[in-house]
Protein backbone atom coordinates (compact mmCIF):
# COMPACT_ATOMS: atom_id res chain seq x y z
CA UNK A 1 0.00 0.00 0.00
CA UNK A 2 1.26 3.48 -0.86
CA UNK A 3 2.04 5.45 2.34
CA UNK A 4 0.12 8.71 2.85
CA UNK A 5 1.66 11.66 4.70
CA UNK A 6 -0.91 14.45 4.68
CA UNK A 7 -1.29 15.61 1.07
CA UNK A 8 2.01 13.93 0.12
CA UNK A 9 2.06 10.38 -1.25
CA UNK A 10 5.10 8.14 -1.68
CA UNK A 11 5.53 5.09 -3.87
CA UNK A 12 8.66 3.02 -3.37
CA UNK A 13 9.63 1.62 -6.75
CA UNK A 14 9.53 -2.15 -6.67
CA UNK A 15 11.32 -2.29 -10.03
CA UNK A 16 14.29 -0.18 -8.84
CA UNK A 17 17.66 -1.69 -9.70
CA UNK A 18 20.04 -2.59 -6.91
CA UNK A 19 23.18 -0.53 -6.41
CA UNK A 20 25.19 -3.43 -7.81
CA UNK A 21 23.25 -3.39 -11.10
CA UNK A 22 25.35 -2.05 -13.97
CA UNK A 23 24.08 0.76 -16.13
CA UNK A 24 23.03 -0.77 -19.45
CA UNK A 25 20.42 -0.98 -22.17
CA UNK A 26 17.92 0.51 -22.82
CA UNK A 27 19.09 3.41 -20.64
CA UNK A 28 22.54 3.48 -22.24
CA UNK A 29 21.05 4.20 -25.66
CA UNK A 30 19.39 7.32 -24.23
CA UNK A 31 22.01 8.85 -21.91
CA UNK A 32 25.68 7.93 -22.16
CA UNK A 33 29.10 9.42 -21.49
CA UNK A 34 30.14 9.59 -25.14
CA UNK A 35 27.12 11.71 -26.07
CA UNK A 36 27.68 13.79 -22.93
CA UNK A 37 31.22 14.60 -24.08
CA UNK A 38 29.82 15.90 -27.37
CA UNK A 39 27.20 18.00 -25.58
CA UNK A 40 29.76 19.39 -23.14
CA UNK A 41 32.16 20.33 -25.94
CA UNK A 42 29.44 22.17 -27.84
CA UNK A 43 27.58 23.88 -25.00
CA UNK A 44 30.73 25.03 -23.20
CA UNK A 45 31.73 26.82 -26.42
CA UNK A 46 28.49 28.82 -26.64
CA UNK A 47 28.77 32.55 -25.87
CA UNK A 48 28.00 33.16 -22.21
CA UNK A 49 28.48 29.61 -20.95
CA UNK A 50 29.34 29.29 -17.25
CA UNK A 51 28.57 26.67 -14.63
CA UNK A 52 25.60 27.68 -12.46
CA UNK A 53 26.02 27.85 -8.66
CA UNK A 54 25.77 24.93 -6.25
CA UNK A 55 24.64 26.54 -3.00
CA UNK A 56 25.39 25.01 0.39
CA UNK A 57 22.29 25.49 2.56
CA UNK A 58 23.61 24.41 5.94
CA UNK A 59 21.11 26.49 7.89
CA UNK A 60 18.27 24.65 6.23
CA UNK A 61 20.13 21.35 6.63
CA UNK A 62 20.21 21.87 10.40
CA UNK A 63 16.51 22.67 10.42
CA UNK A 64 15.69 19.48 8.52
CA UNK A 65 18.17 17.34 10.46
CA UNK A 66 20.54 16.18 7.69
CA UNK A 67 24.32 16.39 7.40
CA UNK A 68 24.34 18.64 4.33
CA UNK A 69 22.02 20.18 1.78
CA UNK A 70 23.12 21.47 -1.61
CA UNK A 71 20.93 23.28 -4.11
CA UNK A 72 21.90 23.43 -7.79
CA UNK A 73 20.63 26.85 -8.83
CA UNK A 74 19.87 26.71 -12.55
CA UNK A 75 17.83 29.89 -12.49
CA UNK A 76 20.77 31.70 -14.11
CA UNK A 77 21.42 29.50 -17.15
CA UNK A 78 22.22 31.68 -20.22
CA UNK A 79 19.84 34.32 -18.85
CA UNK A 80 16.86 32.05 -19.60
CA UNK A 81 15.97 31.35 -15.95
CA UNK A 82 15.92 27.56 -16.13
CA UNK A 83 17.89 24.38 -16.82
CA UNK A 84 15.92 24.03 -20.06
CA UNK A 85 18.42 26.37 -21.72
CA UNK A 86 20.74 23.37 -21.98
CA UNK A 87 18.27 21.11 -23.77
CA UNK A 88 16.12 22.81 -26.40
CA UNK A 89 18.87 25.06 -27.69
CA UNK A 90 21.31 22.14 -27.92
CA UNK A 91 18.79 20.15 -29.95
CA UNK A 92 18.33 23.16 -32.28
CA UNK A 93 22.09 23.44 -32.73
CA UNK A 94 22.44 19.71 -33.49
CA UNK A 95 19.55 19.83 -35.94
CA UNK A 96 20.98 22.82 -37.82
CA UNK A 97 24.49 21.35 -37.96
CA UNK A 98 23.08 18.19 -39.50
CA UNK A 99 20.90 20.18 -41.92
CA UNK A 100 23.91 22.22 -43.10
CA UNK A 101 25.98 19.07 -43.74
CA UNK A 102 23.15 17.49 -45.73
CA UNK A 103 22.55 20.71 -47.70
CA UNK A 104 26.22 21.02 -48.68
CA UNK A 105 28.39 17.94 -47.97
CA UNK A 106 31.52 20.03 -48.61
CA UNK A 107 30.82 22.19 -45.58
CA UNK A 108 32.21 21.33 -42.14
CA UNK A 109 30.12 23.64 -39.91
CA UNK A 110 31.43 24.97 -36.61
CA UNK A 111 29.71 26.49 -33.58
CA UNK A 112 31.48 29.78 -34.22
CA UNK A 113 30.34 29.82 -37.83
CA UNK A 114 26.80 28.99 -36.80
CA UNK A 115 26.60 31.80 -34.24
CA UNK A 116 28.17 34.43 -36.50
CA UNK A 117 25.78 33.73 -39.37
CA UNK A 118 28.26 32.08 -41.72
CA UNK A 119 25.61 29.56 -42.88
CA UNK A 120 22.60 31.86 -42.72
CA UNK A 121 21.64 31.25 -46.36
CA UNK A 122 20.96 27.65 -45.32
CA UNK A 123 19.66 28.06 -41.75
CA UNK A 124 17.22 30.79 -42.81
CA UNK A 125 15.26 28.14 -44.69
CA UNK A 126 14.65 26.16 -41.45
CA UNK A 127 11.77 26.57 -38.99
CA UNK A 128 11.93 24.75 -35.65
CA UNK A 129 8.72 24.21 -33.70
CA UNK A 130 7.66 23.00 -30.28
CA UNK A 131 4.91 22.89 -27.69
CA UNK A 132 5.77 24.14 -24.23
CA UNK A 133 4.71 25.09 -20.73
CA UNK A 134 7.19 27.97 -21.04
CA UNK A 135 10.80 27.13 -20.24
CA UNK A 136 11.50 24.63 -23.02
CA UNK A 137 9.97 27.00 -25.57
CA UNK A 138 12.16 29.82 -24.35
CA UNK A 139 15.22 27.62 -24.86
CA UNK A 140 14.15 26.63 -28.38
CA UNK A 141 13.38 30.27 -29.26
CA UNK A 142 16.74 31.42 -27.91
CA UNK A 143 18.49 28.62 -29.79
CA UNK A 144 16.71 29.59 -33.02
CA UNK A 145 17.72 33.22 -32.59
CA UNK A 146 21.30 32.36 -31.60
CA UNK A 147 21.89 29.87 -34.40
CA UNK A 148 19.92 31.60 -37.14
CA UNK A 149 16.60 29.91 -37.97
CA UNK A 150 12.88 30.58 -37.53
CA UNK A 151 10.74 29.38 -34.63
CA UNK A 152 7.06 28.46 -34.11
CA UNK A 153 5.76 27.70 -30.62
CA UNK A 154 2.37 26.47 -29.40
CA UNK A 155 1.32 27.07 -25.80
CA UNK A 156 -1.77 25.96 -23.90
CA UNK A 157 -4.31 28.06 -22.05
CA UNK A 158 -2.53 27.73 -18.69
CA UNK A 159 0.77 29.31 -19.78
CA UNK A 160 1.20 32.77 -18.29
CA UNK A 161 1.34 35.86 -20.48
CA UNK A 162 4.75 36.68 -19.05
CA UNK A 163 6.18 33.39 -20.28
CA UNK A 164 4.58 33.93 -23.69
CA UNK A 165 6.20 37.36 -24.00
CA UNK A 166 9.57 35.95 -22.95
CA UNK A 167 9.50 33.56 -25.90
CA UNK A 168 8.37 36.29 -28.29
CA UNK A 169 11.29 38.43 -27.11
CA UNK A 170 13.60 35.87 -28.78
CA UNK A 171 11.76 36.21 -32.08
CA UNK A 172 9.43 33.21 -31.82
CA UNK A 173 5.96 33.19 -33.35
CA UNK A 174 3.86 32.01 -30.39
CA UNK A 175 0.30 30.69 -30.75
CA UNK A 176 -1.96 30.01 -27.75
CA UNK A 177 -4.38 27.06 -28.08
CA UNK A 178 -7.26 25.85 -25.95
CA UNK A 179 -6.59 22.63 -24.07
CA UNK A 180 -3.62 21.30 -22.09
CA UNK A 181 0.06 20.68 -22.80
CA UNK A 182 -0.45 17.25 -24.34
CA UNK A 183 -2.97 18.70 -26.80
CA UNK A 184 -0.44 21.29 -27.96
CA UNK A 185 2.16 18.54 -28.43
CA UNK A 186 -0.17 16.72 -30.81
CA UNK A 187 -1.16 19.91 -32.65
CA UNK A 188 2.40 21.11 -33.23
CA UNK A 189 3.37 17.66 -34.56
CA UNK A 190 0.48 17.70 -37.04
CA UNK A 191 1.11 21.26 -38.21
CA UNK A 192 4.87 20.69 -38.50
CA UNK A 193 4.25 17.70 -40.75
CA UNK A 194 1.99 19.84 -42.95
CA UNK A 195 4.31 22.86 -43.21
CA UNK A 196 7.73 21.20 -43.18
CA UNK A 197 8.80 22.48 -39.75
CA UNK A 198 11.26 20.56 -37.56
CA UNK A 199 9.77 19.60 -34.20
CA UNK A 200 12.12 20.13 -31.24
CA UNK A 201 10.22 18.50 -28.37
CA UNK A 202 11.42 17.68 -24.86
CA UNK A 203 9.09 14.66 -24.73
CA UNK A 204 9.34 11.50 -26.80
CA UNK A 205 6.62 9.31 -28.22
CA UNK A 206 6.31 6.44 -30.70
CA UNK A 207 8.22 7.36 -33.85
CA UNK A 208 9.83 10.47 -32.31
CA UNK A 209 12.87 9.68 -30.16
CA UNK A 210 16.07 11.22 -31.55
CA UNK A 211 15.54 14.93 -30.86
CA UNK A 212 14.27 14.41 -27.27
CA UNK A 213 17.39 12.31 -26.70
CA UNK A 214 19.52 15.32 -27.71
CA UNK A 215 17.47 17.54 -25.42
CA UNK A 216 18.06 15.21 -22.48
CA UNK A 217 21.74 14.82 -23.27
CA UNK A 218 22.11 18.58 -23.03
CA UNK A 219 20.84 18.42 -19.45
CA UNK A 220 23.74 16.17 -18.45
CA UNK A 221 26.06 19.17 -18.66
CA UNK A 222 24.39 20.43 -15.48
CA UNK A 223 24.87 17.05 -13.79
CA UNK A 224 28.57 16.98 -14.56
CA UNK A 225 28.94 20.50 -13.20
CA UNK A 226 27.43 19.26 -9.93
CA UNK A 227 29.92 16.40 -9.66
CA UNK A 228 32.77 18.85 -10.17
CA UNK A 229 31.31 21.33 -7.65
CA UNK A 230 30.54 18.94 -4.80
CA UNK A 231 32.86 19.74 -1.86
CA UNK A 232 35.86 17.67 -0.79
CA UNK A 233 35.21 14.87 -3.22
CA UNK A 234 32.04 13.86 -1.37
CA UNK A 235 28.88 12.63 -3.05
CA UNK A 236 25.18 13.06 -2.25
CA UNK A 237 23.35 10.19 -0.57
CA UNK A 238 19.94 11.42 -1.77
CA UNK A 239 18.79 13.50 -4.73
CA UNK A 240 15.33 15.01 -5.22
CA UNK A 241 14.37 15.93 -8.80
CA UNK A 242 11.18 17.40 -10.29
CA UNK A 243 9.11 15.24 -12.63
CA UNK A 244 7.26 16.71 -15.63
CA UNK A 245 7.53 14.35 -18.61
CA UNK A 246 10.63 12.86 -16.97
CA UNK A 247 13.37 14.25 -19.24
CA UNK A 248 15.31 16.11 -16.55
CA UNK A 249 14.93 13.35 -13.98
CA UNK A 250 16.06 10.67 -16.43
CA UNK A 251 19.04 12.72 -17.61
CA UNK A 252 20.21 13.27 -14.03
CA UNK A 253 19.55 9.65 -13.07
CA UNK A 254 21.23 8.17 -16.13
CA UNK A 255 24.36 10.31 -15.94
CA UNK A 256 24.84 9.63 -12.23
CA UNK A 257 24.15 5.91 -12.63
CA UNK A 258 26.69 5.51 -15.41
CA UNK A 259 29.28 7.76 -13.74
CA UNK A 260 28.97 6.70 -10.09
CA UNK A 261 27.80 3.08 -10.48
CA UNK A 262 27.15 1.61 -7.01
CA UNK A 263 27.90 4.96 -5.34
CA UNK A 264 24.94 6.66 -7.00
CA UNK A 265 22.51 8.38 -4.61
CA UNK A 266 19.00 7.32 -3.71
CA UNK A 267 16.93 8.88 -6.47
CA UNK A 268 13.56 10.48 -5.67
CA UNK A 269 11.23 11.96 -8.32
CA UNK A 270 8.66 14.56 -7.19
CA UNK A 271 5.70 15.92 -9.14
CA UNK A 272 2.35 17.69 -8.60
CA UNK A 273 -0.57 15.49 -7.54
CA UNK A 274 -2.59 16.95 -10.44
CA UNK A 275 0.09 16.06 -13.00
CA UNK A 276 1.19 12.64 -11.76
CA UNK A 277 2.09 10.72 -14.91
CA UNK A 278 5.40 9.41 -13.54
CA UNK A 279 3.85 8.37 -10.24
CA UNK A 280 1.03 6.57 -12.03
CA UNK A 281 3.52 4.90 -14.36
CA UNK A 282 5.50 3.67 -11.36
CA UNK A 283 2.34 2.25 -9.80
CA UNK A 284 1.50 0.41 -13.02
CA UNK A 285 5.04 -0.56 -13.94
CA UNK A 286 4.58 0.92 -17.42
CA UNK A 287 3.88 4.38 -18.94
CA UNK A 288 0.50 5.71 -17.84
CA UNK A 289 -1.15 9.15 -18.15
CA UNK A 290 -1.75 11.50 -15.25
CA UNK A 291 -4.99 11.13 -13.34
CA UNK A 292 -5.29 14.82 -12.43
CA UNK A 293 -6.53 17.80 -14.42
CA UNK A 294 -2.99 19.25 -14.86
CA UNK A 295 -4.11 22.51 -13.23
CA UNK A 296 -1.10 23.24 -11.03
CA UNK A 297 0.83 26.34 -10.03
CA UNK A 298 3.95 24.31 -10.88
CA UNK A 299 3.38 25.21 -14.53
CA UNK A 300 6.55 23.63 -15.88
CA UNK A 301 5.48 20.26 -14.45
CA UNK A 302 1.91 20.30 -15.82
CA UNK A 303 2.45 17.28 -18.07
CA UNK A 304 0.00 14.45 -18.58
CA UNK A 305 2.07 11.85 -20.45
CA UNK A 306 5.48 10.32 -19.81
CA UNK A 307 8.36 10.66 -22.26
CA UNK A 308 9.03 7.10 -23.43
CA UNK A 309 12.81 7.32 -23.46
CA UNK A 310 12.80 8.99 -20.04
CA UNK A 311 10.80 6.04 -18.71
CA UNK A 312 13.45 3.67 -20.10
CA UNK A 313 15.77 5.07 -17.42
CA UNK A 314 13.40 5.94 -14.57
CA UNK A 315 11.58 2.59 -14.58
CA UNK A 316 14.53 0.99 -12.82
CA UNK A 317 16.73 4.00 -11.99
CA UNK A 318 14.35 5.86 -9.67
CA UNK A 319 13.96 4.58 -6.12
CA UNK A 320 10.90 6.58 -5.06
CA UNK A 321 8.11 8.62 -6.64
CA UNK A 322 6.34 11.37 -4.68
CA UNK A 323 3.32 13.54 -5.45
CA UNK A 324 2.29 16.61 -3.46
CA UNK A 325 -0.15 19.49 -3.60
CA UNK A 326 0.21 23.10 -4.69
CA UNK A 327 -0.12 24.34 -1.10
CA UNK A 328 3.59 23.69 -0.50
CA UNK A 329 4.86 25.88 -3.34
CA UNK A 330 4.51 29.41 -1.95
CA UNK A 331 5.93 28.66 1.53
CA UNK A 332 9.00 26.94 0.11
CA UNK A 333 9.66 29.70 -2.44
CA UNK A 334 9.48 32.25 0.37
CA UNK A 335 11.68 30.13 2.65
CA UNK A 336 14.43 30.03 0.03
CA UNK A 337 14.06 33.74 -0.73
CA UNK A 338 14.53 34.60 2.94
CA UNK A 339 17.55 32.39 3.57
CA UNK A 340 17.64 30.16 6.66
CA UNK A 341 20.13 30.78 9.46
CA UNK A 342 22.83 32.35 7.31
CA UNK A 343 22.01 30.59 4.04
CA UNK A 344 22.20 32.62 0.82
CA UNK A 345 18.89 33.92 -0.53
CA UNK A 346 17.78 31.81 -3.49
CA UNK A 347 15.33 32.77 -6.24
CA UNK A 348 13.35 29.62 -6.99
CA UNK A 349 10.39 29.48 -9.36
CA UNK A 350 7.20 27.52 -8.87
CA UNK A 351 8.47 24.38 -10.60
CA UNK A 352 11.81 24.39 -8.78
CA UNK A 353 10.66 23.70 -5.23
CA UNK A 354 8.78 20.40 -5.37
CA UNK A 355 11.86 18.36 -4.44
CA UNK A 356 12.76 20.59 -1.51
CA UNK A 357 9.15 20.56 -0.34
CA UNK A 358 9.26 16.76 -0.14
CA UNK A 359 12.51 16.91 1.82
CA UNK A 360 11.06 19.47 4.24
CA UNK A 361 8.11 17.16 4.81
CA UNK A 362 10.55 14.40 5.71
CA UNK A 363 12.21 16.74 8.19
CA UNK A 364 8.87 17.14 9.98
CA UNK A 365 7.65 13.54 9.74
CA UNK A 366 9.92 10.81 11.18
CA UNK A 367 7.91 8.10 9.42
CA UNK A 368 8.45 9.74 6.03
CA UNK A 369 12.14 10.33 6.77
CA UNK A 370 12.55 6.68 7.70
CA UNK A 371 10.69 5.59 4.57
CA UNK A 372 13.15 7.58 2.42
CA UNK A 373 16.24 6.59 4.41
CA UNK A 374 16.89 10.17 5.50
CA UNK A 375 18.77 10.70 8.75
CA UNK A 376 21.43 12.89 10.38
CA UNK A 377 24.10 11.47 8.09
CA UNK A 378 22.25 12.19 4.84
CA UNK A 379 23.85 14.43 2.23
CA UNK A 380 20.99 15.75 0.11
CA UNK A 381 21.07 17.35 -3.35
CA UNK A 382 18.15 19.38 -4.70
CA UNK A 383 17.91 20.33 -8.37
CA UNK A 384 16.73 23.95 -8.54
CA UNK A 385 15.32 23.71 -12.02
CA UNK A 386 14.15 27.31 -12.53
CA UNK A 387 14.41 30.83 -11.21
CA UNK A 388 11.85 33.59 -11.68
CA UNK A 389 10.87 32.47 -15.18
CA UNK A 390 7.81 34.71 -14.88
CA UNK A 391 8.80 37.78 -12.89
CA UNK A 392 5.22 38.84 -12.14
CA UNK A 393 4.12 35.41 -10.92
CA UNK A 394 7.25 35.16 -8.76
CA UNK A 395 6.67 38.53 -7.11
CA UNK A 396 2.99 37.76 -6.49
CA UNK A 397 3.91 34.55 -4.65
CA UNK A 398 7.02 35.69 -2.77
CA UNK A 399 6.00 39.29 -2.10
CA UNK A 400 9.30 40.64 -3.43
CA UNK A 401 10.86 40.79 -6.85
CA UNK A 402 13.66 38.43 -7.83
CA UNK A 403 15.97 41.43 -8.04
CA UNK A 404 15.16 42.41 -4.45
CA UNK A 405 15.70 38.85 -3.22
CA UNK A 406 19.11 38.62 -4.87
Image: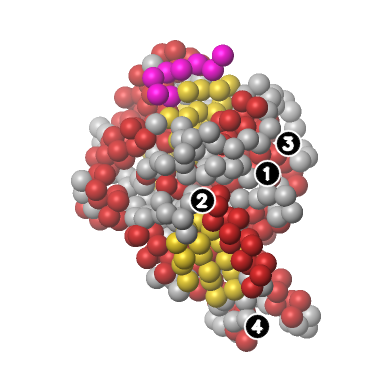
Give the extent of the magenta segment: 1-8
Return the residue at label 3: 23
Categorize mark 2 by other alpha carbons within 10 Å: few (<14), some (14-19), many (20+).
many
The residue mark sitting in front, 4 or 1, is: 1
Residue 87 lies in the magenta stretch = no
**15 over 251 or under it: above or below:** above
* Residue drawn where x is 61% and y is 50% of the image: 203
Q: CA distance from mark 3 to mark 1?
A: 18 Å
Percent position of residue 72, x then y: 44, 44
Categorize mark 1 by other alpha carbons within 10 Å: few (<14), some (14-19), many (20+).
many
Q: CA distance from mark 2 to mark 4?
A: 32 Å
Please tell me which of labels 2 and 4 falls first in the chain. Answer: 4
In the rendered view, does 392 fall on the left or right side of 1? left
Mark number, residue 129: none
Q: Nearer the viewer, residue 45 or 397?
A: 397
Q: CA distance from mark 4 to mark 1?
A: 32 Å
Categorize mark 3 by other alpha carbons within 10 Å: few (<14), some (14-19), many (20+).
many
* Residue drawn where x is 30% and y is 51% of the image: 393
In the structure shown, which secondary structural element does the residue marked by tag 3 occupy?
loop
Residue 132 can be seen in this image: yes
In the structure shown, which secondary structural element does the residue marked by tag 4 occupy?
helix
Return the residue at label 4: 122
Please tell me which of labels 3 and 4 falls first in the chain. Answer: 3
Amino acid sequence: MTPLYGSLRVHHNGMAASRETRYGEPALSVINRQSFAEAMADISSWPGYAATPLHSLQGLARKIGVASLHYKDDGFRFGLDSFKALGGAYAVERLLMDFIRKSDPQLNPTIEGLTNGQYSDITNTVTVACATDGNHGRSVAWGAQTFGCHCKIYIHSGVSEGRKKAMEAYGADVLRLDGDYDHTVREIAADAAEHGWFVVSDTSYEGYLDVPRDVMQGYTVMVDEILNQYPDGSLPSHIFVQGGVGGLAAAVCGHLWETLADERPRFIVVEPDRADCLYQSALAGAPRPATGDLETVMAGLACGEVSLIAWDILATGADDFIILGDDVVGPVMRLLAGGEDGDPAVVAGESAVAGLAALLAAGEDPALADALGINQGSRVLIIGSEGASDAEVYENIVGRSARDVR
